[in-house]
Image (cartoon, rainbow, N blue to C red):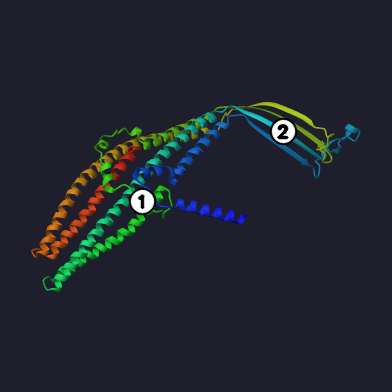
């Protein structure tokens, strides 16, 4: 019975594992939401926030009451000897008598309650722990923005490879049909051999591109799976299309988005750096302030020649102490002053970096908007070019089979068409990627 239960349990585990590794499907928004929870970089960013929260409490706890216990046991293998003047006991002046004051064994237990009353560095530490937590949260937002952009790019690359496969496969079938017809015409003596060779050259290049796109398609899916945070070989299906997303991501309103750099995550992170450097200045200055602490302890000690401390008749001697400690820094040979000056210089550098980042962000926003606007305009142009290339290719194909156009003209029209097809697909992907880039710079998490 036990063996059957073990086998049944193993089968259940295997079924669960298989279910977890089964096929999955995502729209782009679903993929983004999934990655923002399961991507490994996002998980680590969440853990960094948890660490910062624990660090904040660790810093706070140093100013709260502390209780420590101490147990000390001593066994003199050779007891220490003290000398006292012999004349105290009637001996000769100038001579000494060795005396052992301690018992061979002793044990003591003490508990101490301490409380920090004032420490300037502690107050700065509390502020620093809050800033550290804020830095961790901003880093998480930055990570989410980067992961969102990475998912969009990876998702778009998969769609691009899928659309490219469809177009190349269709072009290959058309070329193979053309080659068959031209081959038959050539065999009947109604076509030159050069025409057959021109089609073969075009077909050969097309097959090579098709095979390359097949390999890239596999890599694109694997890259998407890694970005999502799932196994690299998971069978993933995408429910959105490249054309649908390109239309969805075409928004002229984005070009009029708020350009206030203070709302961007990069600016807030730089601002955090200034705040942390300012706290370093305060910390260095706090080293010159006095520190005040208080403590109270109590304990028991026992003594004996043998280890009989567990006996009921063992005598224990109690002790207790209340104390206040005040430490006043007076002179450090200008060491504290040098540390303070270093911190102030770092603060000045951080302020300069903040101004530089502010200027760079303004340029990045303008550049991203320009690139996005160009992507929209280029998409319209590439769509028109594709329509023209399709008409030109059809006309040259008709002319060729009617004998009024050369195979070279047909091959040139076909090559132009294939190039226009890829440029059109790339133009759709550019709209998606450029919009994602603009959103990342503007710190926009939602579509």
The residue at the far left in this view is 404
Based on the displayed image, in which of its 4 quarters is residue 169 positioned? bottom left
Is residue 409 shown above or below 271? below
Q: 385 or 289, which lies in front?
A: 385
Q: Tell me the quadrant of the picture where the N terminus can be found.
A: bottom right
The reply to whether residue 102 is visible in this rendering is no
Q: 73 or 255, which lies in front?
A: 255
Within 10 Å of the Cα at label 1, are there few (<14), some (14-19), or many (20+) other Cα atoms? few
Within 10 Å of the Cα at label 2, are there few (<14), some (14-19), or many (20+) other Cα atoms? some
Give the Cα separation between the discs numbered 2 and 1. 68 Å
Residue depicted at 21% across the width and 56% down the height: 419
Residue 443, given in percent of the width and then of the height, sits at: 35, 37
In the image, 296: left or right of 388?
Answer: right
| Residue at numbered disc 1 | 237
Q: 169 or 351, which lies in front?
A: 169
- Along the polypeptide, which appears first: circle 2 or circle 1? 2
| Residue at numbered disc 2 | 110
In the image, 61: left or right of 150?
Answer: right
Is residue 15 shown above or below 277? below
The residue at the far front in this view is 1
Residue 221, given in percent of the width and then of the height, sits at: 36, 53
Residue depicted at 15% across the width and 59% down the height: 413
Residue 447, given in percent of the width and then of the height, sits at: 32, 39
Based on the displayed image, in which of its 4 quarters is residue 189 positioned? bottom left
């Amino acid at each position: 019975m036990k063996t059957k239960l073990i086998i049944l349990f193993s089968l259940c585990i295997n079924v669960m594992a298989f279910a977890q590794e089964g096929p999955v499907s995502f729209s782009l928004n679903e993929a983004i939401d999934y990655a923002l929870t399961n991507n490994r970089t996002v998980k680590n960013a969440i853990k960094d926030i948890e660490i910062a929260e624990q660090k904040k409490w660790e810093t706070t706890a140093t100013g709260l009451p502390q209780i420590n216990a101490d147990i000390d046991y001593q066994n003199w293998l050779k007891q220490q000897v003290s000398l006292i003047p012999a004349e105290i006991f009637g001996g000769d002046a100038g001579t000494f008598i060795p005396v052992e004051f301690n018992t061979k064994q002793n044990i003591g237990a003490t508990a101490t309650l301490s409380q920090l009353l004032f420490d300037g560095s502690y107050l700065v530490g509390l502020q620093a722990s809050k800033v550290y937590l804020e830095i961790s949260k901003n880093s998480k937002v930055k990570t989410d923005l980067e992961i969102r952009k990475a998912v969009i790019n990876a998702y778009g690359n998969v769609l691009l490879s899928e659309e490219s496969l469809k177009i190349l496969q269709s072009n290959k079938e058309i070329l193979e049909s053309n080659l068959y017809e031209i081959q038959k015409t050539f065999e009947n003596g109604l076509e030159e051999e050069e025409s057959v060779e021109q089609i073969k050259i075009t077909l050969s290049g097309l097959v090579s591109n098709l095979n390359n796109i097949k390999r890239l398609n596999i890599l694109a899916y694997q890259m998407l799976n890694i970005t999502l945070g799932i196994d690299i070989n998971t069978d993933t299906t995408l429910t959105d299309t490249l054309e649908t997303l390109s239309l969805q991501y075409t928004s002229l309103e984005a070009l009029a988005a708020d350009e206030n750099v203070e709302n961007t995550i990069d600016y807030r992170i730089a601002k955090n750096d200034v705040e942390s450097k300012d706290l370093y200045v305060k910390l260095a200055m706090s080293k010159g302030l006095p520190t005040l602490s208080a403590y109270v302890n109590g304990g028991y000690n026992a003594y004996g020649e043998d280890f009989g401390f567990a006996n009921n008749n063992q005598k224990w001697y109690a002790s207790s102490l209340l104390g206040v400690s005040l430490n006043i820094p007076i002179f450090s040979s200008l060491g504290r002053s040098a540390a303070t000056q270093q911190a102030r210089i770092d603060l000045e550098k951080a302020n300069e970096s903040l101004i530089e980042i502010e200027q760079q962000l303004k340029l990045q926003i303008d550049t991203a908007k320009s690139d996005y606007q160009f992507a929209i305009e280029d998409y319209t142009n590439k769509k028109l070019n594709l329509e023209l290339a399709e008409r030109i290719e059809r006309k040259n194909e008709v002319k060729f089979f009617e004998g009024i156009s050369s195979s070279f003209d047909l091959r040139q029209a076909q090559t132009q068409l294939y190039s226009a097809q890829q440029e059109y697909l790339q133009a759709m992907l550019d709209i998606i990627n450029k919009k994602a880039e603009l959103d990342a710079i503007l710190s926009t998490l939602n579509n």
